[in-house]
Amino acid sequence: MQVTHRRSRPIKMTTIASLQRAWVQPLMCMLLLSSSVMVLGCGVPRAVSVTWVANGTRGDGPTSLSAAQVLESMQGLGAFTGAYVSPRTTSFSCVDSRGISPGQVPLLETPGGDMAELQGAIVIYHRMMKTKATAASVDAIFRAFVSSKHVSTTRPFYFHTSDGGLKKAFAKVGTMTGTSAPIVLPTELPANKTLAGIWLEALSYGESQGCGHLKYMINEPLKYGLIGAHEAAVPANLIKSYYSFGWRRTGGKSDARSKLLFPILHGLLEGQATVIIKKAESTQCPGRFPQASPAHGGNQVFIYQADAVADFRRLVLTPFFVSYSKGRINSGKFYEHLSKLQGIQLGATLDLLSPVHHIPLYSVSVSDLVM
């Protein structure tokens, strides 16, 4: 069994830095060239109001932002991009305060991004179909979704990790193979099936996640409303499907990863406030919401686009799963159950994730003016 180390190249590999070029940069270019998906004529997000909702579940920390500081940060020239986008055609990134700026690509935010949203929908689908989720059924749904009209090179499927998460995955690969830990991530699926399985297992391990929402979901499934072993395995199985799809080559001509947005976040998670953006729908273009940057003016905030993601669940995920079930699922019930599960999972992360549980929660509303 071969595991790659420095100066040995039994399978095609790349460094973490060049991984950004291999997986992300070609996609970034396509997204920037397709900026027409942003609607600039809908007005500009200008009037911002901030309302305190609650303290952190474990008490606010010394670096927490006050409502006035949040208002100042959100009103800053870089806090909102000046572009309204539709949840139907925009990727959902994570609320992670280290997140990539929506100025780079069109983005809205929800805990865990597209990955966590699809995870919840898969769980509800199996509940309503009265079937048990398996690795095969999860993979089939993932591939159907990324092959649907809802995912494209201009609306890629988002999942992030971090440099720290990858290092833990590398250490686990070393432990599972009984060799020194590798230092790079494969850019192609290892030909050796045993080695490929080890990589997928290591990358889907809870501690290997760069996303705290998914990490705790894998490690403490009951707190996230995942009942039984089959539901508890859904997040890890979905992550395996993501990596497998990204590694897969289609006929040697097209690269599957062009439909994936895979940022590797760096540095410490130092969010100073959690912001829920509500009442932000454009008055000029209904159904579109303002993008917001998680970092501005030296401050980091966790941003949750509550109304935008509700539209995504209602207008994208619900119709997709109703169709996937061949009409055997009631759309109203599916949306209701999905919203409830995602509410449970949001609450769990607010309580478990540091520093989220030590910072205040604010509600932010935004209004636009005609340009």
Image (cartoon, rainbow, N blue to C red):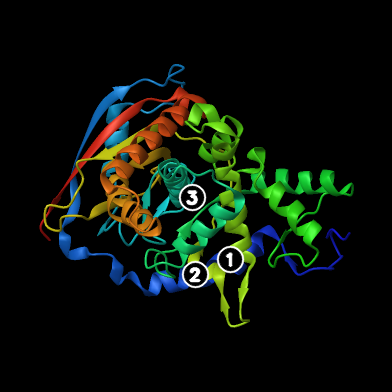
User: With 198 as the anchor, is 151 left or right in this view?
Assistant: left
- Dot 3: what SS? helix
Residue 62 image point, x, y percent: 46, 21
Q: Quadrant of the N terminus?
A: bottom right
Q: Quadrant of the C terminus?
A: bottom left
Residue 107 image point, x, y percent: 37, 55
The residue wearing badge 1 is 23
Is there CB contact under 8 Å for labels 1 and 2? yes
Return the residue nearer the eye: 56 or 179: 179
Q: Amino acid at mark 3?
A: Met
Write the residue at 52% across / 72% down.
Answer: 26
Q: Amino acid at mark 1?
A: Trp
User: With 280 as the anchor, is 194 left or right in this view?
Assistant: right
Farthest residue in the top direction?
A: 59
- Identify the image quadrant of residue 75: top left
Residue 110 seen in the current view: yes
**Badge 3: how crowded within 10 Å, few (<14), some, or many (20+)?**
many
- Identify the image quadrant of residue 298: top left
- Dot 2: what SS? helix
- Dot 1: what SS? helix
Above or below, 309 relative to 361 = below
The residue wearing badge 3 is 115
Q: Which dot marks residue 27?
A: 2
